[in-house]
Image: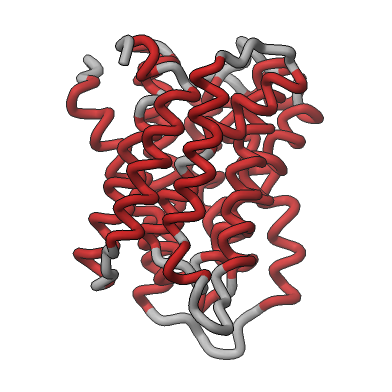
Amino acid sequence: MVTKPLIELPLLAAIWGASFIFMKIGSPEFGPILFMAMRTLVASLFLIPLVFINQKQHVLFEHRQKIFIVGLLNTAIPFVLFGWATLTLTAGNTAVLNGTTPMFGALIAYFWLKDKLSFPAVIGICIGFIGVYFLMFDKIMVENSTVLLPTLAVMLAAFCYGLSANYTKMYLQGISPLALAAGSQISATIVLLPISFFYLPSVMPSQSAVLSVIALGVVCTGIAYIMFFRLIEAIGPAKTISVTYLIPVFGIFWGVIFLNETVTYWTLLGTCLIFTGVALTTGILSKKKL
């Protein structure tokens, strides 16, 4: 099957942008821990057969310890943080805050892997974090505001993603992406599922919440991972990671369409600053000599 990046790249962004909608719907009814445990379980059940079909099961066994760490950093911890944050934050704002992941990745690579950090990248990181402040400004300024801790939770989740990316680069480079994806979901399920039994909801979740966790596990995790790997193989990781810029756009769009979320001037200003910061940090703007 031929990969069509011009179609699949925005489609992948649309799917991942929609994940924040499903979290916003399902997390309040299931609770963030049970909801994310169900998400990783559904994703695992979807990905495991693909691992055996592609005969990658030996990779899971050989690298199980390192893959387990990736499962914690890239799945279990950030998923729960996102689930908890969406109890308070809008889907659109959560998606935009998630866009800071490349900035954290660059900072961690600089301090841990000793990667170079150019002057434009430093400026970009500063601009990006200023954008986070403006994004949440009107909400933080409200008396008795409850968005500060959820905002920090999303930032911590983005930090975990950046840490996981650098850990993978150092210890799991060249490992089958499919095996790594399945292993991370399985590892997260092993961790989250036993804990989730202590947080069972008192009321049976609605049909929309159940459908949300199924869609999140199959479409936004299982199918999305497959598309992601296809794009990496077809156009390379550098171009594929540009999906990061599109996810917040779709997150805001889906939030407005399906959840009637409002977009303020502060949201637009913060989003633009974060986009600029990420573009400078990843070298997109410098490559264009802006």
Closer-to-camera residue (124/54): 124
Q: Residue furthest right?
A: 65
Which is nearer the eye, 4 or 284? 284
Is 117 displayed left or right of 13 in the figure?
right
> In the rendered image, is residue 84 in sight?
no
Query: Residue 61's spot in the image, x, y percent?
Result: 75, 25
Is 94 placed left or right of 111 in the picture? left
Q: Position of residue 191 (x, y in %)?
A: 75, 53
Q: How is the image coloured?
A: secondary structure
Task: Give the percent coordinates (x, y) of residue 100.
Answer: 51, 40
Which quadrant would residue 197 be assigned to in this image?
bottom right
Q: Residue at x 45, y 63 (%)?
A: 23
Asked which quadrant contains residue 99, the reply is: top left
User: What number of labels is visible?
Assistant: 0
Horizontal side of 58 relative to 248 (left or right) equals: right
User: Residue at image x 45%, y 31%?
Assistant: 278
Residue at (19%, 23%) from the top-left corner?
A: 6
Query: Vertical placement of 36 versus 7: above or below?
Result: below
Q: Quadrant of residue 160?
A: top right
Above-or-below relation of 242 to 213: above
Position of residue 226 relative to residue 153, above or below, is above
Above or below, 125 relative to 205: above
Judged from this view, the residue extending furthest toward the bottom is 203
Q: Where is residue 274 drawn, in percent x and y? A: 42, 41
Nearest the eye: 257 or 32: 257
The quarter of the rendered structure image containing the N terminus is top left
Q: Point out the image quarter for the C terminus.
A: top left
